[in-house]
Amino acid sequence: MRFKDVIGQDEIKSRLVQAYKDNRVSHSYLFYGAPGVGKMALAIAFAQYLSCENKEDGDSCGHCPSCLKYEKLVHPDLHFVFPYITSSNSQNKAVSDTYIDLWRPMVNNSPYFSYRDWTNNLQSENKQCQIYAAESAEIIKKVSLKTYESDYKVMIIWLPEKMNTECANKILKVLEEPPHNTVFLLVSNNREDILPTIQSRTQPVKVLGIADEPLKQALVEKFGISESEAADVVKISNGSFLEARQQIEQDEENAFNFDNFKSLMRICYKYDVVSTFDFAKSISKLSRERQKSFINYCLIMVRENFVRNVNSDVAYLTKEEEEFSVNFSRCINERNIDSYITILNDTYYQIERNGNSEIIFTDTAFNIMKIIRK
Ligand SMILES: [Zn+2]
């Protein structure tokens, strides 16, 4: 990851580069700020920059032997510490590296990831992740080894606020006075939850939201959406790439649900029995969560169209939904609204109970056929 691949944050990039040029790189930094603003991206880009053998124009070169290893996050002088779960019988054995094969592909894929992304990866369900006491010995051991290939050894600690007190106390000394050319980069979502003794030993770098323009450009590039769509997403993302991503995924899911809603209602309106089976088959191939999301969307659309039918001013519909509703809303009225809601709620209930989706959605369509022209 080069600085140029970090979205925005130009001021921090130049500050870090300047610190290197002035020969005053601190032995430990604390990057803190909201999720999704690029703290991990900055930490990795800075680490790669420090190790690069051909630094150019305030960035790493991207092709020296060190950069090539950094691009895969396999440089032997780069270490990661992060929270994980451990079962009670392995509590004294598991360390971050136990999970490195889950960690590295996720970070390689994108350094913009959420805590949730990580716990999903770990399949930790609802268990709390921590950096356990066993990690302290690992940290001390790693920093005391000589550097293998690079002038700098870098240890990135993700979410130091999740480090347990015993571990934190054991690393205070090494954090305060690490061996020569060892740099700790702490990356935190909640600075106030970090132990004060850790905070006081690090140089704080506050990372604010990504500026609008670079965030917009990144969304266009990474999600293939238009400039104006991206501008709309930026407005509600608080400078967070993660919030923007979530919004785009939500929009995509809505668009997908809308297409299926239109198909279902057209099939029912036309009493198209053959298409009903095809429709039920295709919906049944989605995950249960997506099926439930679709039914929830149908419930919202049914209510909104009823409201629109009664009073066209107050319905909350997107432009595309509104175009469809001009004609469709007549199909939802005070004679059948309750039946729609009962049918859809029943569908949801049966899907949740793991019934056969193909049969359930076929029934749903037949039931809607009975009421759609009422
Ligand atoms: Zn390089």
Image (cartoon, helix red, strand yellow):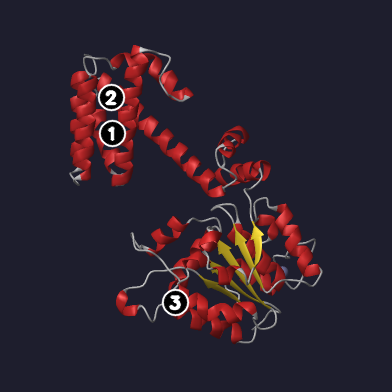
- Specify whether tag 3 is near ligand 1 (CB below 8 Å): no
Task: Decide: few, some or many residues near mark 3? Use Cα within 10 Å; few <14, some 14-19, many ≥20.
Answer: many
Res 94 seen here: yes
Q: Earlier in the sequence, mark 1 or mark 3?
A: 3
Residue 257 location, x and y as percent?
A: 37, 34
On the image, which quarter does residue 291 sit in? top left
Give the residue type at disc 3.
Val
Give the residue type at disc 2.
Ile
Identify which residue is drawn at 81% across, 68% down: 21
In the displayed structure, 71 sits above or below 309; it is below
Residue 321 location, x and y as percent?
A: 42, 24
Whether pointer 1 and pointer 3 mark residues with C-beta atoms closer than 8 Å, the reply is no
Q: Nearer the viewer, mark 1 or mark 3?
A: 3
Whether pointer 1 and pointer 2 mark residues with C-beta atoms closer than 8 Å, the reply is yes
**The C terminus lies in which quarter of the figure?**
top left
Residue 185 location, x and y as percent?
A: 61, 69
Identify which residue is drawn at 31% across, 45% down: 289
Identify which residue is drawn at 54% across, 63% down: 108
Q: Earlier in the sequence, mark 2 or mark 3?
A: 3
Q: Which of marks 2 and 3 is in front?
A: 3
Q: Please name whichever residue, 102 or 159, is drawn nearer the observer in this view of the structure.
A: 159
Give the residue type at disc 1.
Phe
Label 2: which residue?
A: 267
Res 72 seen here: no
The label on residue 95 is 3
Label 1: which residue?
A: 279
Q: Find the distance from the CA under tag 1 to the CA under tag 2.
A: 9 Å
Task: Decide: few, some or many residues near mark 2? Use Cα within 10 Å; few <14, some 14-19, many ≥20.
Answer: many
Q: Please name whichever residue, 127 or 349, is drawn nearer the observer in this view of the structure.
A: 127
Residue 322 location, x and y as percent?
A: 43, 20
Identify which residue is drawn at 62% across, 46% down: 218
Whether pointer 2 and pointer 3 mark residues with C-beta atoms closer than 8 Å, the reply is no
